[in-house]
Amino acid sequence: MKVDRLFMEKDCPDCGSIRAILDMDAVTRDDFRGAADQELRVLISLSNQASIEMLEKFDLKKEQMPVLVTYEGKTIRKPDRILSHLRKNEMTIDD
């Protein structure tokens, strides 16, 4: 199964810019797929400690939010590159 995972934190400024263009209605549907027929899982923590624990569970201990891990195993760290990936894969409201 192809799954992209996007990790964000509440009140994170960079996360806010991503959330603003993300098609939240689409990503909450189980049948939503990106351009490569991949699913998108959006994981949002509500506190800094929750972010640390969540990232550790996914072997992303040294990462900071936002971070996106593609179904191919590529880690995308910079917000502008995350936005580019989401747009390229038709996961935004401004396609």
Image (cartoon, rainbow, N blue to C red):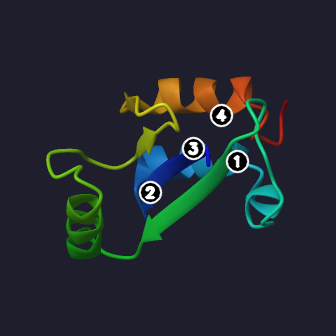
In what element is the residue under mark 1?
loop
Q: Label 2 is placed on what type of residue?
A: Met
- Left or right of 63? Residue 47 is right
Tag nearer the camera, 3 or 2: 2
In what element is the residue under mark 2?
strand
Q: Earlier in the sequence, mark 3 or mark 2?
A: 2
Tag nearer the camera, 1 or 3: 1
Q: Earlier in the sequence, mark 4 or mark 3?
A: 3
Residue 10 in view: no
Quarter placement of the C terminus: top right
- Residue 64 screen position, x and y as percent: 26, 47
Question: In the rendered image, which residue does mark 4 sit on?
Answer: 86
Q: Residues within 10 Å of mark 1 (few under 14, many from 20)?
A: many
Tag nearer the camera, 4 or 1: 4
Question: In the rendered image, which residue does mark 3 sit on?
Answer: 17
Spatial CA span between label 4 and label 1: 8 Å
Q: Label 3 is placed on what type of residue?
A: Ser
- Left or right of 55? Residue 9 is right
Question: In the rendered image, which residue does mark 2 sit on?
Answer: 8
